[in-house]
Amino acid sequence: MSLIIFLQETMVDYGAFAAIGAGLAAIGAGIGIGQIGGSAMEAMARQPEMQAKLQTSAIVLIAFVEAVALFAVVVSLIK
Amino acid sequence: MLLRFSRICTSLLLLLFSANIFANPAEKSDNSKEFDVNEMIMHHIKDSHEFHIMDINGHAVSFPLPIILWTDNGLVTFLSSEFNHDDSGKVIVNRKNQAFIKYHEKIFYAAQTGEKNIIYDSNGVVLNKKPLDLSITKMVFSMFISMVLLVLIFVATARTYSQSRNGEPTGLGKFTEPLVLFIKDEVALPMIGEKNYQKYMPFLLTLFFFIWINNVMGLIPFFPFSANLSGNIAFTFVLAVITFIITTLVANKDYWKHIFWMPGLPVPMKLFLAPIEFLGIFIKPISLMIRLFANISAGHIIILSLISLIFIFKSILLAPVSLFFSVFISLIEVLVVAIQAYIFTILSAMYIGSAIEEHEH
């Protein structure tokens, strides 16, 4: 509780919080996209004939992960 | 074809030079002011009533766009150049016994009482009344250009097919046919299915090409392009709402059953899932909207921030670095804008496909 009061009193610059939030979102999205990309590459190496299908689904999945990160970025942009 | 394009280019150039006439010589340059990166970027990202082209010795050169207002006394129209680049509510334009001011790219009625034109409340919110603003702003102007370009491209494409002897694509058709086939084979067929896909092809193609051309136009850094149209939340909102309406209207019995009473689950789980699935109906188009808006805005912000590095550090030595990185990011953006148009299309197709899918149980 005292920590919150301390933060409220000292951190007038909310821009710093926004930057931290954007950074955390970038970390999360990086991990997620890395996992998808890694698995997709592995699957493509195992079954090259499936490459087109795997690529499509990998891009779509990356879009989903990215959307979550972008929600966070938009929130940090707004405030 | 080439002749027509050169004619368009010439008229665009003429437009560009005619804009010089509207440059305001009275405005003073303020060199003492710190360069505000945030303000510059936000000014670029947001919509505005004039198309700012460049600054010459601190004088703004911009292309004036019409302001169309529905006021208490009826329709009022004038050019935004009458505000003399003023955006702080100082310049008053009088029309039909009414006084208008422009403040932060919004048109207000000027306040009648007192010396100030703007009245604020204690939180700094403007209290002035607003007329209904139907202006052709920078974004609308940019959208009109993209529409004209799309019509030109596809009418020309259609014409090449009537001219070719055996139905093979010639000329511009060689460029557009692979893209159309790509949307058909990679997006519509797998996502919607062989039985129904033809009904949705016009929508998906329009979506893909409209988003793509607007994204690409945002990357071209000079007038009359460079507007951040697909990074405007109103634009993406309307596209997402169209997808939402189509999905909801064509949805069959199975779709609603899977949302409100998921088959094959115990009853407590059905009760638990129903509200989540119901919210999902709205979250899907909202995520479509946010994804396109944030991606394109982020691209514009990154490029502008890299260029502003020179002005933040006030050093010419940084110019090659920032130039290299902004060219690098621009090239990545060329890829990103195509992928974003594709993702918007494929997800719309997926949502439509899931709404008309027939289950066997």
Image (cartoon, rainbow, N blue to C red):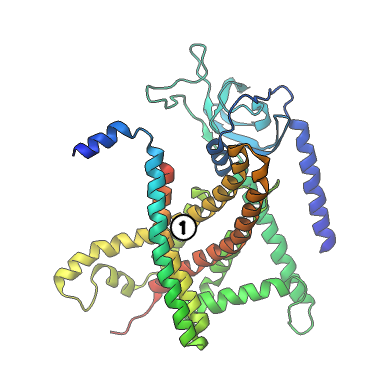
Q: Position of residue B38 (x, y in %)?
A: 53, 38
**A59 relative to B75 in the view: left or right:** left
**B132 relative to A65 in the view: left or right:** right
Q: Which residue is mark 1?
A: B291
Q: Give the total number of marks visible in the rendering.
A: 1
Q: In terms of secondary structure, where does tag 1 sit?
A: helix
- Residue lying farthest to the right in this orientation: B3
Q: Quadrant of the C terminus of chain A?
A: top left
Q: Position of residue B184 (x, y in %)?
A: 56, 76
Q: What residue is at 28 percent from the left and 72 percent from the top?
A: B258
Q: Quadrant of the N terminus of chain A?
A: top left
Q: Is residue B42 above or below residue B78?
A: below
Disc 1 chain ID: B
Q: What residue is at 56 percent from the left and 41 percent from the top?
A: B41
| Residue placed most toward the observer, B219 or B71 | B219
> Is residue B249 at all visible to an observer of this figure?
no
Q: Position of residue B267 (x, y in %)?
A: 15, 72
Q: What residue is at 81 percent from the left and 64 percent from the top?
A: B1
Q: Is residue B80 above or below residue B222?
A: above
Amino acid marked by disc 1: Arg
Q: Is residue B128 above or below residue B144?
A: above
Q: Is residue B81 above or below residue B283?
A: above
Image quarter for residue B216?
bottom right
> Is residue A51 at all visible to an observer of this figure?
yes
- Residue lying farthest to the top in this orientation: B114
Q: What residue is at 36 percent from the left and 59 percent from the top?
A: B283
Graded by Cα atoms within 10 Å as few (under 14), some (14 to 19) or many (20 or more), the crowding at tag 1 reads many
Q: Position of residue B278 (x, y in %)?
A: 29, 62
- Residue lying farthest to the front in this orientation: B317
